[in-house]
Amino acid sequence: MPSGSRGGSSHSSSGRSGGGSHSSFGRSGGGFSSSPSRSSSSSYRSTPSHNTTIVVGGGGYRHGYRRRRYYSSGSPMSIMGIICVIALIAAIIGVTMMSGANAKLKNMQVDYDYYTDMVRTAKADTTNSHTRSAIVTDWYKDTKGEKYFVYYEFEVEDGSGDKMEGISFSVYTLQQAQAIKGTTIEIAIYTPGVTLTPTTGVTWDTDSVPMAYGATRLEDDGVYVAVKSDKSLGTTILGVGGALFVLLILAQVGFFSFLRSRPVANTNSTSNPSAPTSSAPSAGASNSASKFCSYCGAKIGPNDSKCPNCGGVVTQ
């Protein structure tokens, strides 16, 4: 980890042997590299960073602030973050697909009921006022299904001789569509607000559907089957997203339980973690122990009240 990102501090080896250089990691640039003036040390003291280290008598270290915790790109936290993003994206895609498919299926059910009722009305009409003849002109396959539509034409009954085009639902196989192309089929008609007769009533507002549609089920429609497949796929994606989210919660619980079960180091320890452990010094030895200036790191004599290097007041 580069300097400037560390959570702790240590003396450099040159600081021990040179007697006047103290490197404090945690400041951008790596700290002091030479004996600073008093003004520069005052500036340093006036803006302590989050991980400033204070040197105390006896050569120990006291951390004034709790050290930061950093996670690498391959840490459990980053992995769980990636899983969280994937789960969220999957949930959004799944919900979008399901809601869109449900809306289409609902509309298709409404259309199916409307046109099958039109066929039933035409079959029940003994005057043949609700049926007409039409010529199948073409067919095509919809991109969402495996069935085929057919186009047909019938005459507008306004005396102009014009023909209007109708289109079936995608309920034909390719062989069926090819077989009826160019032939005459019977269609059911309905014109809103118009009383139909056997020869009048067809306008540009007339609805129509092949009479054969009354014998089909909604599940026979190729588009309906394709939309149902989209809904199933959306449900699967949503389920995957939900499963990942549950696994994420379980992983977080396990991860933090593991962290709580680990022994936590005392961040306020006054001993140097990098220094070799030794038995507690006697009263006489503690008086003669080396001390260092808390401002510039210079070595201080046991009886000095000020730092001989920078003039800083020695705190006992």
Image (tube, rainbow, N blue to C red):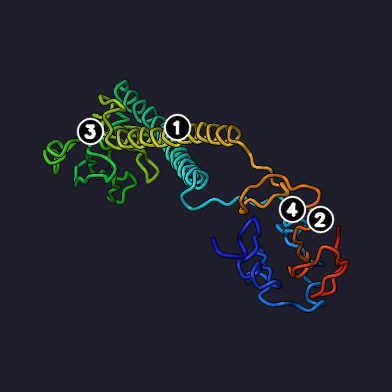
* Foreground label between 3 and 2: 2
Q: Are marks 1 and 4 in contact (CB under 8 Å)?
A: no
Residue type for callout 3: Glu
Q: Nearer the viewer, mark 4 or mark 3?
A: 4
> Mark 3 = which residue?
186
Q: What amino acid does circle 4 point to? A: Arg
Q: Secondary structure at mark 1?
A: helix
Q: Tell me the distance, in whole angstroms, between the alpha carbons under discs 3 and 2.
A: 115 Å
The answer to whether residue 306 is above or below residue 62 is below
Dot 4 or dot 3, earlier in sequence: 4
Q: Residue 96: x and y, percent?
A: 46, 41
Measure the C-alpha gap from mark 1 to mark 4: 47 Å
> Residue sitting at 44 percent across and 35 percent down?
238
Tell me if mark 1 has few (under 14), some (14-19) or many (20+) residues whose alpha carbon lies within 10 angstroms of its own. few
Q: Of 146 and 90, which appears nearest the observer?
A: 90
The Cα atoms of the two marked residues, 2 and 4, are separated by 19 Å
Nearer the observer, 11 or 128: 11
Residue 185 locus on image (x, y percent): 19, 35
**Badge 1 is on which residue?**
243
Q: Is residue 62 rendered to the left or right of residue 118?
A: right
